[in-house]
Amino acid sequence: MPAKPVDIGPLHFERKGDAIEFLRGILYTYELGDRVMAEHAKILTDLIKVHPEASAKIGAGIKDFSVRSGDFGTQCFWVNRTDGTSEKFSFRACL
């Protein structure tokens, strides 16, 4: 099976696995409870827009992103909305 290229905004990856590795690197740059820096938030904004449930995940609008616990104690990205609500999202679901 040929490699599947992935684009995230202006970023291009020749293989889906390369995109996963890149995003995992961003995720583990942070400690639980940290807010995501602006340069990474731009990437996550482009990414969440292609989530299968993008409109539900984005909701009232994106305020910022953070890293918190997900299912089974895993570390994951959370979108923090302008209305004060938050929801976790899987970067893998966006790919």
Image: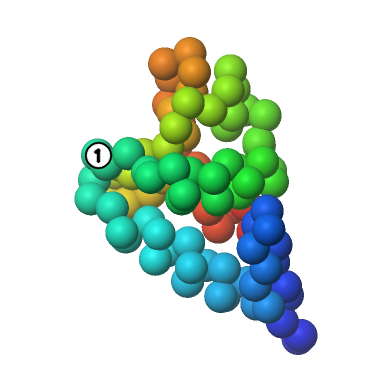
Instruction: Check disc 1 and give the amino acid type.
Output: Gly
Q: Which one is in front, 74 or 67?
A: 67
- Image quadrant in which the N terminus is located: bottom right
Quadrant hosting residue 10: bottom right
- Image quadrant in which the C terminus is located: bottom right
Q: Residues within 10 Å of mark 1 (few under 14, many from 20)?
A: few
Residue drawn at (65%, 72%) of the image: 13
Where's residue 93, x and y in %?
A: 59, 52
* Residue 72 visible, this orientation: no
Residue drawn at (56%, 75%) of the image: 18
Quadrant hosting residue 57: top right
Q: Is residue 86 left or right of residue 1?
A: left
Residue at the far bottom in the pictured view: 1
Where's residue 20, x and y in %?
A: 52, 67
Residue drawn at (57%, 75%) of the image: 17
Residue drawn at (47%, 71%) of the image: 21
Q: Is residue 60 left or right of residue 3?
A: left
Residue that badge 1 annotates: 33
Quadrant hosting residue 65: top left
Where's residue 43, x and y in %?
A: 55, 50
Q: Is residue 89 above or below residue 25?
A: above
Assign a secondary structure to mark 1.
loop
Residue at the far right in the pictured view: 2
Where's residue 40, x and y in %?
A: 46, 50
* Residue 4 visible, this orientation: yes
- What colour scheme governs how the chains and residues are painted in the rendered image of this protein? rainbow
Report the label total. Answer: 1
Q: Is residue 30 left or right of residue 53?
A: left
